C-alpha cells in the first residue's frame, strides 16, 4: 500500500490515532499512539523509543533511540475502538535494522531462504483462556 493509499484508507475509516508497534526479543509489545495528523512524519521518520527501555538487551540510556518505521501493508483498524488503527513497525537504530526485533529476524530468514530457492514456513501458537461460564 502506498502512503497516499494508506492516508485515503485512514480517512475513509475515520481513524484518528495509529498504534505504531513492534515486538522486542522477549515478546514484549512496544507501542506509541500517534495522531494521524503526524502520519507523514511517522512514515518517513518513525516513532521514537528509548533503546534501553525496549527490553533487557544490555543497552544503557546512552545508547541511541530506536525508530519504529511502520509497514503500511500491516494497517488494521481496531474493531473494539474504530477511531484507532495499528501498524506493525520495523525498528531501526541509526538507519540500520535493529537486530533484536523478531520481525527483522524473520525478514532476514525469508531473504536467506529465498536466495537458496527455499520457502520458509512459520506458524503461530495462539494461547488464550476462556473466562466465565
Image (cartoon, grey):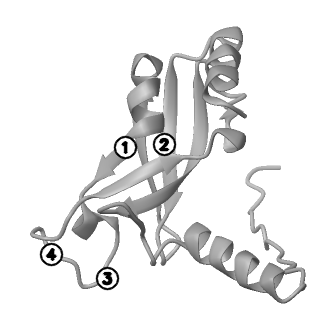
Which quadrant of the figure has residue 47?
A: top left
Which quadrant of the figure has residue 115?
A: bottom right
Mark 3 touches mark 1? (CB < 8 Å): no
In x, y percent, where is residue 129?
A: 74, 62
Between 103 and 1, the one nearer to me in the picture:
1
Mark 1 touches mark 2? (CB < 8 Å): yes
**112 horizontally vs 90: left or right:** right
Label 1 neighbourhood size at 10 Å, few (<14), some (14-19), many (20+)? many
Query: Disc 3 designates what residue?
Result: 57
Between 94 and 24, the one nearer to me in the picture:
94
Q: Which mark is residue 47?
A: 1
Please give the count of numbered marks on the rendered protein.
4
In x, y percent, where is residue 14?
A: 63, 10
| Disc with the residue nearer the chain's start (2 vs 4) | 2
| Disc with the residue nearer the chain's start (1 vs 2) | 2
Mark 3 touches mark 2? (CB < 8 Å): no
In x, y percent, where is residue 106?
A: 66, 75
| Disc with the residue nearer the chain's start (4 vs 1) | 1
Q: CA distance from mark 3 to mark 1?
A: 20 Å
Q: Which mark is residue 123?
A: none
Amino acid at each position: 500500500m502506498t502512503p497516499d493509499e494508506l492516508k485515503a484508507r485512514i480517512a475513509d475509516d475515520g481513524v484518528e490515532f495509529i498504534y505504531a508497534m513492534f515486538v522486542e526479543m522477549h515478546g514484549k509489545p512496544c507501542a506509541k499512539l500517534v495522531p494521524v495528523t503526524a502520519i507523514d512524519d511517522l512514515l518517513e521518520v518513525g516513532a521514537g523509543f528509548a533503546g534501553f527501555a525496549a527490553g533487557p538487551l544490555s543497552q544503557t540510556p546512552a545508547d541511541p533511540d530506536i525508530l519504529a518505521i511502520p509497514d503500511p501493508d500491516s494497517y488494521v483498524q481496531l474493531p473494539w475502538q474504530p477511531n484507532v488503527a495499528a501498524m506493525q513497525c520495523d525498528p531501526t537504530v541509526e538507519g540500520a535494522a535493529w537486530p533484536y526485533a523478531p520481525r527483522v529476524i524473520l525478514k532476514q530468514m525469508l531473504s536467506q531462504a529465498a536466495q537458496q530457492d527455499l520457502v520458509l514456513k512459520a506458524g503461530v501458537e495462539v494461547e488464550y483462556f476462556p473466562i466465565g461460564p
